[in-house]
Image (cartoon, rainbow, N blue to C red):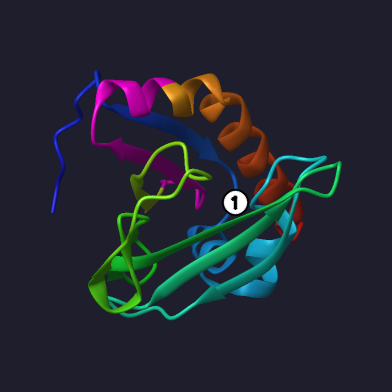
Amino acid sequence: MAFPIDPERDLVLERTVEVPPSFVWDAWTRPELLKRWFCPKPWSTTEAEMDLVPGGIFRTVMRGPEGQEFENVGCFLEIVPGRRLVWTGALGPGYRPRTASPTVPFVMTAIIAIEATATGGTRYRATVLHGDAASRGRHEALGFHRGWDAAFDQLVAMAPKD
């Protein structure tokens, strides 16, 4: 399923890297790997929990350099093994609507697309949908491009070397 991009509400990060698509998929879907790269340093991901089924939990806890922690809980909407992962923070596990929280500056839905290149690398696209332009703006101001790009660099650095 393709989603039209709304430049007023959505953010996109696209990269092509010489890392096998299977590794990118594993890094996104295995909690022990996700914890190693998901936040740009000096932040860290201290907890990761996922149930890779539609409606299954996607939960992380991110810790800042001063010890502050942010829990993110959502659910998976779509899983196409090796190719596409979609989750949202608007719904919790079992598709339960989330309640508003003063610690969450915006709600988003993330679409991770993974495609093999002719050289065996990966064409990667992270699309983050927001409900309104203000939420998109808050996410961008928090450093979406810089942060997601740095985190993906950490994923690439973990890849096995041939």
Q: Residue at x 39, y 40 (%)?
A: 125
**Frontmost residue, 3 versus 48:** 48
The answer to whether residue 100 is magenta is no
The quadrant holding residue 132 is: top left
Instruction: Please state which amino acid type lies under the numbered disc 1.
Output: Val
Residue 56 versus residue 14 in the image, above or below? below
Q: Position of residue 101 (x, y in %)?
A: 44, 49
Q: How many numbered badges does the structure rendering display? A: 1
**Frontmost residue, 82 versus 58:** 58
Q: Residue at x 47, y 23 (%)?
A: 140
Numbered disc 1: secondary structure: loop
Residue 75 versus residue 128 in the image, above or below? below
Q: Which residue is mark 1?
A: 19
Residue 18 versus residue 29 in the image, above or below? above
Q: Which residues are magenta?
A: 117-137
Q: Position of residue 45 (x, y in %)?
A: 71, 58
**Frontmost residue, 17 versus 30:** 30
Q: Position of residue 160 (x, y in %)?
A: 74, 61
Q: Residues within 10 Å of mark 1 (few under 14, many from 20)?
A: many
Left of 47 or right of it: where is 67? Answer: right
The quadrant holding residue 5 is: top left
Q: Residue at x 52, y 67 (%)?
A: 59
**Frontmost residue, 54 versus 131:** 131
**Could you tell me which quadrant the N terminus lies in?**
bottom left
